[in-house]
Amino acid sequence: MKQYKFILSGGGTGGHIYPAIAIANELKYRFPDAEFLFVGAKDKMEMQKVPQAGYNIKGLWISGLQRRLTFDNALFPIKLLSSLLKARRIIKQFKPDVVIGTGGFASGPLLQVAAIAGIPTVIQEQNSFPGITNKLLSKKANKICVAYENLERFFPKEKMILTGNPVRQDLIDIESKRDSAIQYFNLDPNKKTLLVLGGSLGARRVNQLIEKELANMLSQNVQVIWQCGKLYLEDYKKYNSANVQVVAFIERMDLVYAAADIVISRAGASSVSELCIVGKPVIFIPSPNVAEDHQTKNAQAIVDKKGALMLKESELDSQFSLVFEVLLKDQGKQNQLSENIKLLAMPEATKQIVDEIVKLIR
């Protein structure tokens, strides 16, 4: 049997890294003898997270364009050329059967070089509104696995497959883990648990909101698990108490979702996909600072199906207290949101994406 070789590229945030790792794990399960290599951006979090998951990674000297004039922007053409040359060397040496991109700066040069070399490429697009890199790469890609319907205006229709986003398999059937989750986080089973997720790096505006509203929340018999992000831990760890757990990062996402009664979250594509699977009542607070405002579009796609609530950052001061209080007191509304968001889940996404990859090598 042929020993297959796969290159995966995705990074910058957990939303690009974890789907790539999920795809690699499923490929490894099917092809235990396969060789894997990840390619990321040199100074981004994938350089730590991928080796922790047991895979080798090489870094490219690449970063995105800033929206204002900066020294980094002036360096962009040099970085891009350097990354294209290094990607070419990597492809030549490793000789992959397929190259898979899940987004992030490094996937652009890598998939471009692979496509020119005639190596099959697969794009996994997580958002309801694709970024410019994937739009450009889609012209040469063999397959584009998407998580949302109606993306024909961005991608060639004949290459698209609706699969959903890869999620950690341990998130399926979290209800059975609730008791052990309450024990793991040392929670009071008689109180509602609020889970706050600001993304892997943290979200300044979400953290400011929770700081402002914390006393009010605690007065309503709520306990809080507050993932503030590694950039903000020093600012907010002072709020740790019997009913508040402030953490930079959560390793056991399956247990934290199992323990949660209500979730406040950013609307990155991976978070949205996970929340559909775990089926908890959610208030989305999309980040307005991402390309093409895709977080708002991701959240809106769920809100339109009555599967979540959404507050824009500009609405937080005037509306958050009331929206949270009404949801907290209305069990019927919580149940309705849970049922509706679960209908949008695609738990087989990782397997379907790997099925499409396998078709390219057989």
Image: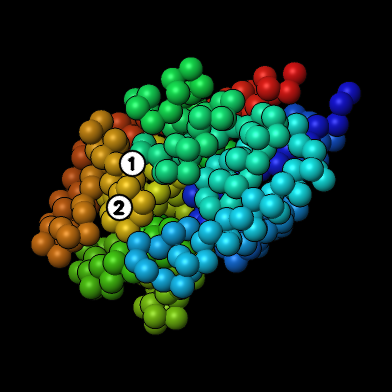
- Using the rendered view, name the quadrant where residue 199 is placed: bottom left
Characterize the local packing of mark 2: few (<14), some (14-19) or many (20 or more) Cα atoms within 10 angstroms.
many
Left or right of 163, for residue 32: right
**Label ID, residue 97:** none
- Here the colouring is rainbow
Q: State whether residue 101 is above or below residue 142.
A: below
Looking at the rendered structure, the secondary structure element under dot 1 is helix
Name the spot of residue 64 as percent of width and height, x first: 48, 58
Tell me, yes or no, whether the two marked residues, 1 and 2, touch with CB atoms within 8 Å. Answer: yes
Name the spot of residue 26 as percent of width and height, x first: 68, 34
Identity of the residue drawn at 47% across and 38% down: 136
Q: Nearer the viewer, residue 42 or 300?
A: 42
Query: How many marks do you count on the picture?
Result: 2
Residue type at the position of mark 2: Pro
Characterize the local packing of mark 1: few (<14), some (14-19) or many (20 or more) Cα atoms within 10 angstroms.
many
- Using the rendered view, name the quadrant where residue 236 is placed: bottom left
Q: Nearer the viewer, residue 81 or 336?
A: 81
Identity of the residue drawn at 46% across and 73% down: 71
Residues under labels 1 and 2: Cα distance?
8 Å
Identity of the residue drawn at 59% across and 25% down: 142
- Using the rendered view, name the quadrant where residue 285 is placed: bottom left
Left or right of 292, for residue 178: right
Identity of the residue drawn at 21% across and 52% down: 311
Q: Quadrant of the C terminus?
A: top right
Q: Which residue is mark 2?
A: 286
Left or right of 169, for residue 283: left
Q: Does residue 353 appear in this view?
A: yes
**Label ID, residue 298:** 1
Name the spot of residue 316 as percent of width and height, x first: 18, 61
Residue type at the position of mark 1: Asn
Name the spot of residue 301 as percent of width and height, x first: 29, 35
